[in-house]
Image (cartoon, grey):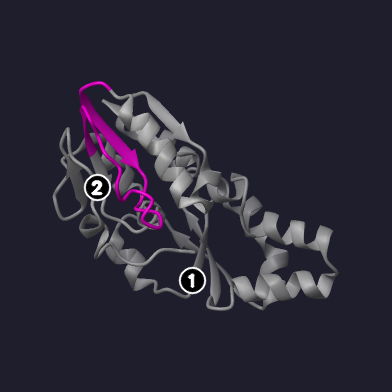
């Protein structure tokens, strides 16, 4: 058994391993690749193509259809049926759906990624005048009505709220703390993997476009 995971999930996955006592080896995938679905798919294909027979647990969502076309020559793949990783932090796709599409989510791991809203805002300030930088961020996030920090228990929440505070204030958006749930992570590690929550791809199979349908909406 091996886990292939996005670095954005490192805090929660390590926390879930401590909770479950599971100690599978983890292959970490660079979080910045999410900005480039084709590159993310190519990197995952490289890793999956090298796997020996066995089971690989993918700690990912479908991530902008980055998983579509992924082929597994020898290993069985188990992948959550989620558009992105937010349902993993929240505990279920249903909870993510209930929170709607106008909430922009943050976690500690998200702010550790190479690219995020706070980093982008800093880059804009370096390159443009303050008014232009503010306009660019507003355009990027114009469909959102609030910021939400998911408290998964795997990191300190206060530093995250402090980092996003200036951007939220500039946009006039409230910052809320919402409870996370480690159930999805623990279930991924221990099983079972019910068909309604997980996609299973047997050796020799591929993830299809049809597999990516009906997994909810993603944070962009």
Q: Residue at x 55, y 45 (%)?
A: 32
- Tell me which residue sits at (30%, 43%) in the image: 70
Under circle 1, the secondary element is strand
Q: Which numbered disc, 1 or 2, marks the residue closer to the eye?
A: 2
Q: In this picture, is 52 found above or below 187?
A: above
Residue 60 is a magenta residue: yes
Spatial separation of the CA atoms under disc 1 and disc 2 = 29 Å
Horizontal side of 4 relative to 219 (left or right) equals left
Give how far across and how far down residue 102 sits, in percent: 47, 75
Q: Is residue 105 visible?
A: yes
Asked if residue 91 lies in the magenta stretch, the reply is: no
Q: Residue furthest right?
A: 129
* Residue 38: image tag: none
Residue occupying image coordinates x 85% and y 69%: 129
Q: Outermost residue, top direction?
A: 52
Relative horizontal placement of residue 107, taking residue 194 as reference (left or right) = right
Taken as a whole, is the magenta stretch helix, strand or loop? loop
Q: Please identify the quadrant where the N terminus is shown.
A: top left
User: At 29% across and 40% down in the image, what residue appears?
Assistant: 186
Label 2 belongs to which residue? 207
Q: Position of residue 206 (x, y in %)?
A: 22, 43
Q: Is residue 152 among what the camera can see?
A: no
In this rendered view, identify the residue nearer to me: 1 or 107.
1
Instruction: Please state the extent of the stretch shown in magenta in the rendering.
Output: 52-77
Asked which secondary structure carries label 2, the reply is: loop
Mark 2 crowd level (few <14, some 14–19, many ≥20, 10 Å Cα): many
The spot of residue 146 in percent (x, y) is 55, 74
Q: Is residue 166 left or right of residue 92?
A: right
Q: Which residue is mark 1?
A: 103
Q: In the rendered image of this protein, does residue 22 appear above or below residue 183?
A: above
Where residue 164 sits, quadrant-wise, is bottom right
Instruction: Looking at the image, tell me whether mark 1 or mark 2 is earlier in sequence order.
Output: 1
């Amino acid at each position: 058994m091996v886990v292939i995971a996005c670095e954005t999930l490192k805090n929660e996955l390590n926390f879930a391993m401590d909770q479950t006592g599971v100690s599978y080896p983890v292959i970490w995938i660079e979080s910045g690749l999410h900005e480039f679905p084709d590159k993310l798919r190519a990197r995952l294909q490289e890793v999956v193509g090298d796997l020996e027979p066995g089971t690989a647990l993918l700690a990912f969502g479908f991530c902008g259809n980055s998983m579509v076309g992924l082929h597994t020559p020898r290993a069985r793949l188990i992948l959550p049926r989620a558009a992105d990783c937010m349902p993993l932090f929240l505990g279920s796709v249903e909870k993510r759906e209930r929170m709607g599409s106008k909430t922009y989510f943050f976690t500690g791991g998200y702010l550790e990624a190479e690219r995020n809203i706070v980093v982008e805002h800093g880059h804009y300030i370096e390159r443009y005048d303050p008014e232009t930088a503010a306009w660019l961020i507003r355009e990027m996030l114009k469909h959102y009505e609030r910021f939400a920090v998911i408290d998964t228990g795997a990191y300190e929440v206060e530093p995250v709220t402090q980092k996003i505070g200036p951007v939220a204030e500039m946009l006039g958006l409230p910052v809320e703390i919402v409870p996370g749930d480690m159930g999805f992570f623990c279930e991924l590690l221990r099983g079972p993997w019910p068909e309604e929550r997980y996609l299973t791809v047997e050796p020799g199979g591929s993830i299809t476009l049809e597999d990516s349908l009906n997994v909810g909406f993603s944070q962009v």
